[in-house]
């Protein structure tokens, strides 16, 4: 009989720890709703003690998102646990996830406490969390570099104190499948009360083994996996949800397990997370990359045309990748637009549809065909992007072989209209210098990339930028048929995200 694997999604917590990624409260709620639609079992909504904004986001998700267990992270101390509980107490099914490091490296250099003190602190934390809820998860941070005998003792003690899930993190992505599988098997065999808890795993991808390690752990007794959409997360990221789920689905012969994931929601979720965090999905990324189902070589194309099974181990439809690409043009009406948006997962109010339709008409006047990708960029920008502090109103640029590149920018700053002009070495430089003048940005532009959303010279350009100020990095994106407008939008989006990140700057955590 296949066994159930519980999917614990930490996109909103560990995923948000990706350098530059940030989501505001509305964006987090949207992602959480989509995760519920995807069918994840547990949503780790955040780390409430880390900032006021984080607390509010976790609270809102706990109150509004129904279906999955809503989990909040807390270090092993009362203040963190109180804050976590306050944020999730209204959830249908709340969970507190508390953690403390257990490896000698962390004990000696970070916590400066003994193994005995770790055991005392974890008992205190788990039993304190237990006063609030029955559903308590405990993680020994840096478990894979923890002495295995001590790890067994830690896990036994946590379960004795009331933990119902024990999560084994490969915090620094150091382990390899054989070793990680052995650690999980040892816990299964040697911890006397292990049957009273679910074994979970949480793998980082520093050596590119997060998914392989998670699968090895499942085969050795883990029944919960912690993962993120597109594999985003601290440093090299976490195990990618979509890869784990599809491995279990496609290789049932070797992996007799199943999940509650609605796999057709994988691609829409991937797109949403990428659009909101500003973290692009690499084209060759398994399952959700732009090339994941593209057959380039003639031999492969010939094979697929004769029989898909020759080179396809799963269908794009099974992970929710739309197969029809050409959709709308300038003669398309409001109804056609509404239907197409619905198929892409956007249920808009009549007012929102009006706004999108106006912009759609402008794009359709400039381009012969408006593709799904154009529509997604358009809806994200018009409806879901919170303008926050800065808003671009108008832009005009002069450049060419003889003239000095000059930009005139009109913006709204905290609701007040401001206008400036400036020069630059090139037109983008002129635009960015002028926006910098208006906003007083003192940081650096780390990256600037422009790519066309679809093919053709009439394609919309999508610009992504990474900026940094006072050690805080923010990513912004913007799309338009005019790449200078797209560049300005991306910069303004990054500046808004920077403002947000400054406000929620982690309190030394
Ligand atoms: O990687 C890690 O160890 C973590 C813990 C908080 C579970 O994210
Ligand atoms: Zn982690």
Image (cartoon, rainbow, N blue to C red):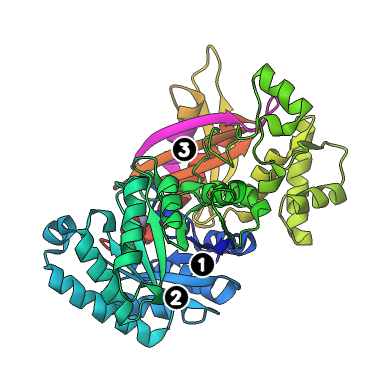
Quadrant containing the N terminus is: bottom right
Q: Which residue is drawn at the image coordinates 48% and 68% (left, top)?
A: 57
Circle nearer the N terminus (1, 2): 1
Residue 20 visible, this orientation:
no
Residue on which the image places disc 3: 465
Quadrant containing the C terminus is: bottom left
- For numbered disc 3, what is the local secondary structure? strand
Q: Which residue is drawn at the image coordinates 59% and 50% (left, top)?
A: 252
Q: Is mark 3 within 8 Å of ligand 2?
A: no
> Magenta span covers which residues?
430-459
Q: Callout 1: few (<14), some (14-19), or many (20+) C-alpha neighbours within 10 Å?
A: many
Q: Is residue 456 magenta?
A: yes
Ligand 1 placement by image quarter: bottom left
Q: Is residue 499 magenta?
A: no
Q: Is residue 232 left or right of residue 276?
A: left
Image coords of residue 243 (percent x, y): 53, 47
- For numbered disc 1, what is the local secondary structure? strand
Q: Give the distance between the C-alpha atoms of the residues marked 2 and 3, in whole angstroms.
A: 36 Å
Image coords of residue 389 (percent x, y): 49, 55
Nearer the observer, 264 or 34? 264
Task: Give the foreground label among 1 and 3.
Answer: 1
Label of residue 95 in the image:
2
Circle nearer the N terminus (2, 3): 2
Query: In the picture shown, does residue 135 fall above or below 17?
Result: below
Circle nearer the N terminus (1, 3): 1
- Contact check, label 2 and label 3, Cβ < 8 Å: no
Query: Toward which corner of the image does residue 121 lie, by quadrant?
Result: bottom left
């Amino acid at each position: 009989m296949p066994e159930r694997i519980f999917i614990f999604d930490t996109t909103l917590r560990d995923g948000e720890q990706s350098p530059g990624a940030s989501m505001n409260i509305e964006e987090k709620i949207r992602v959480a709703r989509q995760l519920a639609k995807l069918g994840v079992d547990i949503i780790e909504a955040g780390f409430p003690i880390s900032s006021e904004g984080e607390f509010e986001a976790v609270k809102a998700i706990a109150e509004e998102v129904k279906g999955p267990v809503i989990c909040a992270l807390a270090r092993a101390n009362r203040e963190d646990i109180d804050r976590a509980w306050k944020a999730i107490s209204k959830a249908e099914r709340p969970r507190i996830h508390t953690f403390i490091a257990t490896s000698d490296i962390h004990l000696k250099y970070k916590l400066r406490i003994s193994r005995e003190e770790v055991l005392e602190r974890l008992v205190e934390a788990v039993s304190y969390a237990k006063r609030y809820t029955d559903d308590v998860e405990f993680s020994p941070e840096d478990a894979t570099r923890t002495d295995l005998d001590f790890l067994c003792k830690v896990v036994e003690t946590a379960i004795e104190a009331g933990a119902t899930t024990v999560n084994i993190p490969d915090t620094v992505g150091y382990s390899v499948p054989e070793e990680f599988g052995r650690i999980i098997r040892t816990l299964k065999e040697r911890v006397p009360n292990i049957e009273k808890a679910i074994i979970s795993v949480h793998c980082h991808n520093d050596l590119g083994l997060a998914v392989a390690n998670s699968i090895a752990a499942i085969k050795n007794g883990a029944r919960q996996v912690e993962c993120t959409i597109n594999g985003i997360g601290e440093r090299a990221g976490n195990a990618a949800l979509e890869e784990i789920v599809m491995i279990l689905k496609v290789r049932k012969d070797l992996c007799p397990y199943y999940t509650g994931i609605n796999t057709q929601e994988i691609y829409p979720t991937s797109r949403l997370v990428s659009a909101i965090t500003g973290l692009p999905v690499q084209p060759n990324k398994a399952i959700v990359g732009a090339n994941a189902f593209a057959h380039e070589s003639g031999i492969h194309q010939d094979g697929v045309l004769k029989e898909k099974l020759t080179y396809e181990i799963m269908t794009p439809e099974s992970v929710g990748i739309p197969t029809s690409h050409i959709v709308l043009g300038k003669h398309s009406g409001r109804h056609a637009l509404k239907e197409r948006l619905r198929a892409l997962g956007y249920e808009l109010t009549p007012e929102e549809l009006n706004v999108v339709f106006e912009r759609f008409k402008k794009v359709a006047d400039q381009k012969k065909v408006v593709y799904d990708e154009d529509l997604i960029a358009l809806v994200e920008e018009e409806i879901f992007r919170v303008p926050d502090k800065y808003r671009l109103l108008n832009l005009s640029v002069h450049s060419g072989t003889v003239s000095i590149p000059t930009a005139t920018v009109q913006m709204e700053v905290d609701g007040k209209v401001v206008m400036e002009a400036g020069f630059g070495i090139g037109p983008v430089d002129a635009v960015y210098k002028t926006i910098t003048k208006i906003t007083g940005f003192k940081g650096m532009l780390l990256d600037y990339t422009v790519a066309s959303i679809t093919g053709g010279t009439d394609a919309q350009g999508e610009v992504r930028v990474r900026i940094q100020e006072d050690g805080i990095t923010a990513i912004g994106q913007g799309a338009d048929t005019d790449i200078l407008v797209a560049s300005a939008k991306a910069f303004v989006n990054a500046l808004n995200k920077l403002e947000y990140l400054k406000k929620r700057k982690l309190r030394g955590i």
